[in-house]
Amino acid sequence: MSAELSITPQAELWARYSTGLYRNEELGFSLDLSRVRMSPSEQSAIAEMFPMAFSAMAQLEAGSIANKDEGRMVGHYWLRAPQLAPTPELEADILQAIFDVKAFCQAVHEGEIRGSGGKFTNVLLIGIGGSALGPQFIATALASSQDKLHMSFFDNTDPDGIDLVLSSLASRLATTLVVVVSKSGGTPETRNGMLEAQAAFQSAGIPFAPQAVAITQAGSKLDQTAQSEGWLKTFPMWDWVGGRTSVMSTVGLVPAALQGLDIDGLLEGAGQMDSLTRVPQVKENPAALLAMAWYHCGQGRGSKDMVLLPYKDRLALFSKYLQQLVMESLGKELDRKGQKVNQGIAVYGNKGSTDQHAYVQQLRDGLNNFFATFIEVLKDRHGDSIEVDAGVTSGDYLYGFYAGTRKALYESGRDSITITVNEVNAHSVGALIALYERAVGLYAELVNINAYHQPGVEAGKKAAAQILALQSQAVEVVVRNKASLTADEVAKLANASDVESIYGILRHLAANPSRGIVRHPGKTPAEDRFGKL
Ligand SMILES: O=P(O)(O)OC[C@H]1O[C@](O)(CO)[C@@H](O)[C@@H]1O
């Protein structure tokens, strides 16, 4: 057999890897698509769609109304390149906000701004979705023993979860700075968290307002509350920054700076990646390469899930962060022509090698309905490692498990992407965030959807409001009646048809004695009776 036909798979893969690897030495970043089975003709076919995507992205950065459904610009790239903002006023606003964040946090760190108990020791951030996920991801990814303030989060309206955080803050409330984050200023979960925090401060006899910061749009309900109650500080959010792309705005910069993290590094890393992903050639643009691989793997319909496997504990929250960034951006019913497409890419993952002892079994041998994205971090740790075997460290094992899993998946016909960074630091975290923000934006152009609105979440919010309205009707009926009633009887007396919702509401209330409702179990839910406690 002639030499050129005797290429072994390893030699062929090595050739594919080394010729196709996208690398940027300055950022210490590389992107490997060699384990995505995509022929040159398939790549060319997808690449033909990119000039339109690059042009749309350029218009977006120039200030077009890229979010047509909400009539808004999409300006998260300007947060790390203010000079790109479409007006001098916006540029000035961005620069002023960064200046104010630094000045405020310096005053907190130096004790010029203090709590009733002295210098601040803790931050309690209250937010949800993009108003919490970005701050949580960065706080975890960049945490160190040098942190200036300890970070805690309310990111849900779960009383038990709130109690758990409050108990960890117990003796330190007097030196805890509360940062309430809500772009709309009206998200119920965040409002509830704020009220719970205020109640905790009140029962501890600590004034809340002097230790409270709001990050929200001017004029929002939260802004009005902060102004009327005389909170310590407010920072602006702008309508041209979406919640899931807000981490480089005050939403992420305030908590990161309070923690003592390098916010300039975050912004610089993101800005450097933005420059790379602005290049209008697919092969020279890491975000375009990523979007092309997503499109190929899922045939432009998200038919395969994106499994995130960072082999670094610090990056464990990245998959949760990307779930919102990717799925709230791409998970849409209609495309921009109004056609029903039910688009999206499902995202899940945690970290390697941990996940090899959880679901990698199915990835290797089960349903081939995914593509993996490995994130390899070259630097093992600060300082030296012990040897766990002769000449082998735990970091060698982590590398071996990554490389082995990548090989095992490829050999069983599963595609994977590998992103490699030298180490996890503010620059590389900023760059990773920016990479995915751009890849989502470019991919959305390929499938012609608006990546910047979220109509689907409004449905859930409206339904929740209906349930709460039903609750007050049901309670009023139960309290008014001496005899206990079945859910069906309550529904009839409340002129409500949704018996099951009434049952669920009353069963939940009865499980929490302080609510004054008791459940007398019958043989079936229909026979359960509810009365006053
Ligand atoms: O910052 P807000 O307005 O409280 O919204 C929180 C989150 O809720 C959503 O609006 C809907 O999930 C997200 O887009 C956003 O990040």
Image (cartoon, helix red, strand yellow):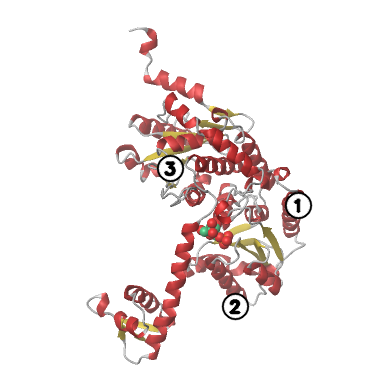
Dot 3 or dot 2: first in sequence order is 2
Q: Position of residue 301 (x, y in %)?
A: 40, 42
Q: Residue at x 32, y 83 (%)?
A: 492
Which amino acid type corresponds to the residue marked 1 in the rendered image?
Glu
Name the residue that disc number 1 marks: 89
Q: Which mark is residue 203?
A: 2
- The quarter of the picture where residue 220 lies is bottom right
Dot 1 or dot 3: first in sequence order is 1
Q: Does dot 2 land on a helix, a strand or a loop?
A: helix
Q: Is residue 368 visible?
A: yes
Which amino acid type corresponds to the residue marked 3 in the rendered image?
Met
- The quarter of the picture where residue 485 lies is bottom left
Question: Are the residues tagged 1 and 3 within 8 Å (C-beta)?
Answer: no
Q: Does dot 1 land on a helix, a strand or a loop?
A: helix
Q: Residue at x 62, y 35 (%)?
A: 278
Dot 1 or dot 2: first in sequence order is 1
Mark 2, Cα crowd under 10 Å, few <14 / some 14-19 / many 20+, is few
Mark 3, Cα crowd under 10 Å, few <14 / some 14-19 / many 20+, is many
Q: Residue furthest left?
A: 523
Q: Position of residue 258 (x, y in %)?
A: 67, 56
Classify the position of the N terminus by image quarter: top left
Say if 197 sits above or below 82 in the image.
Answer: below
Q: Which mark is residue 306?
A: 3
In the image, the residue with mark 3 has its CB under 8 Å from the nearest atom of ligand 1: no
Say if 2 sits above or below 98 in the image.
Answer: above
441, 177: nearer the viewer: 441
115, 294: nearer the viewer: 294
CA separation, marks 1 and 3? Answer: 39 Å
Q: Residue at x 60, y 73 (%)?
A: 198
